[in-house]
Amino acid sequence: MNAMPVILSFTLLFSAGYLMASTMARHRQQIFGRRFALPHARSIALRWSACLCLFLSLYPICSLYGWAIGSVYWFGLLNAALIGAGLMLTYSPHFVRSMGWSCITLSILGTPFIL
Amino acid sequence: MAHFRKNMSGVHTWAGLLLGWLLLWMFITGTLGYFDTELDRWMKPELPIAPTQYDEAHVARTAQDYLTREAPDASRWVIFFPIDRNEPYLRVFWSGVDEAKRYITETRLLDLHSGAPLEARDTGGGQLLYKMHWRLHYMPRALAEIITGSAAMLMLLALITGIIIHRNIFRDIFTFRLSKGRRTWLDLHNLVAVTSLPYQLMITYSGLIFVMFTYMPLVFVSFYGTDAQGRRDFFNAVSTPEIAKPANQAGVLADLSTLVEQKNTIWPDTPIRNMDIRFPGDSHSSVILKSNNAVSPLRASDELVFSGVEGKLLTEQPANKNPTQATHDALLGLHEGLFAPPVLRWLYFFSGILGAMMMATGLIMWEHKRRQQGKSSPLGIWLVSRLNIASIAGMSLSIGAYFMANRLLPSTMTARAEWEVHIMFMSWLACLLHAALRPRYQAWLEQLILTGALFLCLPIVNAITTERGLISSMQHADWVIAGVDYAFLVTGALFLIGAYKVYERFTFSQDTRYKQRTANTNLYEANG
């Protein structure tokens, strides 16, 4: 169905935002409610996963609409995902963790739909 | 580096401030332009629900019958098929020269079943509102082009300097700290600007490409010279080759539905966007069939050229653009977003609103910072603060007034379309005067409340004055008009929430115990 690649791209982008935010001290405190340091290796791994999600999210949307319209769409979804993550971190930070993990799970579960 | 950043900060501030209010206007009307045909339909409630399915041959026959009756002497007919949301109804256009040798054009919407023209109230619609995005109003188009082009150039400058001065553009991407006065405004400015940055850069640059020949004419001149032959050469290079000249002998146009059948054998799955008939009453008439050009930003369409009298296929022109033309058209296509499917269109709209928020927060920050620092002239701060109120709250109110005037002005009024626009600008002027005369906090609160109330009343007035109220639209599954009504409700609610936040902030800052505690800090400035 048409909506699945769009949703999948969005969840991958939100996951990228969530993973990136958890590498930053200020947002880690917002998400997890306490200050703690991250081991260097873990921080690098999270950053690479975030970048991976970012680039993987191009595939579902471009497979549906072609790379021309797909890339424009991707920028739009990136905008929506980042604003969503930013506002959620400010207004309902306790919710970000579950939202982030739901997006990661949905992205993994949704992979068969676009392959 | 710090010195460079400081200078860029100055450029950013002044490039943003000088034409920031005009840019807000351009952004709001341009963003509404992504839904121009939907707003058109809301503003013409007499029009029926747009057809979703149609038979192309039937459409061609209906249009041909009407045009043969009404415009037999025209030199050009164009039939626009109701192919998508950009062209929801069957539209016919004709042009010609009348007895006084003046070039005239006419356009009509036709009903698919009866072939009769669809009548609606005289209004500029969403199209006029959107066109004011670059044409402004009450001024010659050349002047408007110069002004809006300059504004776009300053905005591009402001965007690039903004990127330069933003120190931790990736690290601070999600930072949005509440209740910290100026910091909060800066965080919001950064959040909306950085997340929508690709869109802002694209829209500004492509907007400048629209006026590139005005601003860089010498590039054209260096290739084509300044004479008329040079202009002809350029036109031939970028448009379809010449079609047959008129023979000035009478001829009968073939049945256009036969051309549709021929098209179906050549292009099995491609709908027709329009049929362009040149010199319809002539023996050398031609018909150009264009395929759908809104499937990609390139706006390219394949063409089939037929001879008009015999109905025979002459040539097939695949969409071919040389790389330069393709780059140009792709940029313009990205700006207009006509190719966008529904969700992407909403994302375009959302990004446009974020752009307007970026500019509004920037203007508000200028005012707050200068007031706290106390170094700028009081007149300058007063001017900026009043213009802020009038262009953020007042402009939104004036656009609401435009829609309200569409519903309330009598349909038999002369110059009705112009008066809708006059009412819009008159209410904006009233907002400016109100902002100048009232104390700052009261001005903000009253204008925000009025705007919210006006937008919330729009669906109510719609339901009272027309048969296309929200309940009726939903019953008939007319999601266009229902959607616009919902959008008005949401807009009204957002403005009332904004008014409440202004009220909350002011009453909090007026709390005497808080004032005593924070007497030495400048987090909240006094009203005035």
Image (cartoon, grey):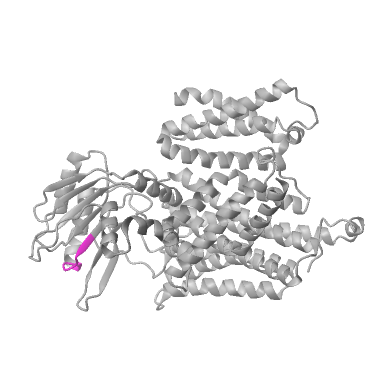
Q: Is residue B300 left or right of residue B73?
A: right
Q: Is residue B61 magenta?
A: no
Residue B149: x percent and y percent?
A: 49, 61
Q: Nearer the viewer, residue B502 or B73?
A: B73
Residue B369: x percent and y percent?
A: 75, 59
Quadrant of res B117:
bottom left
Q: Is residue B71 magenta?
A: yes
Q: What is the number of callouts on the image?
A: 0
Residue A48: x percent and y percent?
A: 62, 25
Residue A67 shows in this picture: yes
Q: Is residue B30 left or right of residue A14?
A: left
Q: Is residue B329 left or right of residue B33?
A: left
A99 versus B9 height, above or below: above
Residue B114 shows in this picture: no
Residue B395: x percent and y percent?
A: 58, 66
Could you tell me which quadrant the C terminus of chain B lies in? bottom right
Q: What segment is highlighted magenta in the picture?
A: B70-77
Q: Nearer the viewer, residue B37 or A59?
A: A59
B111 versus A108 height, above or below: below
Residue at 78% of width from left, 32% of height from top? A33
Q: Residue furthest top?
A: A41
Residue at 23% of width from left, 49% of height from top? B56
Q: Nearer the viewer, residue B464 or B495?
A: B495
Q: Is residue B199 left or right of residue B72?
A: right
